[in-house]
Image: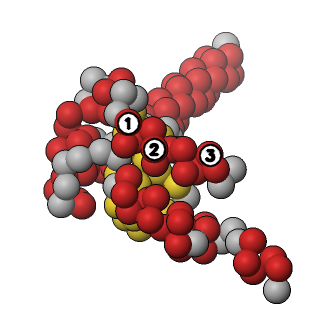
């Protein structure tokens, strides 16, 4: 009888430990950053192309169109479709010094807004930042 209690107690302890580890992992893996600033920084560092945008904004559509032309798929955060969009936009303002959208990041570095993105595209600088061959390079 004492052996049965020991085995049963061991199983109970193992189940409790398993549940505890599961809860611990669930609270850390895929957890949301604690602040809007942390969200912005984590998003920028986790994706090669990030656009903070508003779905109705023509300048945002213009910037997103540039990446479509390059056959690149950016990670887009539509601020107007998030409950915390205003806080994220405030955090962006503190990080880049502008509150306007879009705000575009390439490989963790701030490229700028719509005009900056179009200018970088037209000059070939954007393709270079993305590691894409340009037609001029291919002809040589």
Q: Earlier in the sequence, mark 3 or mark 1?
A: 1
Residue at point 81%, 77% (across, down): 138
Mark 2 falls on what kind of element? helix
Q: How far apart are marks 3 and 1 (CA)?
A: 15 Å
Q: How far apart are marks 3 and 2 (CA)?
A: 10 Å
Mark 3 neighbour density, 10 Å: few (under 14) some (14–19) many (20 or more):
few
Decide which of 7, 81 is in the foreground and name it: 81
Residue bearing the label numbered 1: 58
For residue 62, the mark is 2
Mark 3 falls on what kind of element? helix
In the rendered image, residue 19, in percent from the top left (x then y), is placed at 53, 26
Q: Are marks 3 and 2 in contact (CB under 8 Å)?
A: no
> With 22 as the anchor, is 79 left or right in this view?
left
Q: Are marks 2 and 1 in contact (CB under 8 Å)?
A: yes
Q: Distance between the residues labelled 2 and 1?
A: 6 Å
In the rendered image, residue 131, in percent from the top left (x then y), is placed at 66, 71
Quarter holding residue 22: top right
The nearer-to-camera label among 3 and 1 is 1
Mark 1 falls on what kind of element? helix
Q: In this view, does 47 lie above or below 35?
A: below
Decide which of 15, 71 is in the foreground and name it: 71
Decide which of 138, 106 is in the foreground and name it: 138
Q: Residue furthest bottom?
A: 140
Residue at point 49%, 32% (across, down): 26
Q: Do the residues labelled 3 and 1 touch (CB within 8 Å)?
A: no
Residue bearing the label numbered 3: 68
């Amino acid at each position: 009888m004492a052996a049965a209690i020991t085995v049963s107690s061991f199983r109970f302890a193992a189940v409790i430990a398993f549940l505890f580890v599961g809860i611990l992992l669930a609270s850390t893996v895929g957890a949301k950053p604690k602040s809007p600033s942390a969200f912005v920084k984590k998003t920028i560092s986790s994706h090669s192309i990030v656009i903070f945008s508003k779905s109705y904004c023509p300048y945002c559509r213009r910037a997103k169109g540039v990446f479509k032309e390059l056959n690149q798929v950016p990670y887009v955060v539509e601020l107007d479709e998030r409950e915390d969009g205003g806080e994220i936009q405030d955090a962006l303002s503190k990080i880049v010094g502008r509150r306007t959208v879009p705000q575009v990041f390439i490989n963790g570095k701030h490229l700028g807004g719509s005009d900056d993105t179009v200018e970088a595209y037209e000059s070939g600088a954007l393709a270079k930042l993305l590691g894409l061959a340009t037609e001029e390079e291919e002809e040589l």
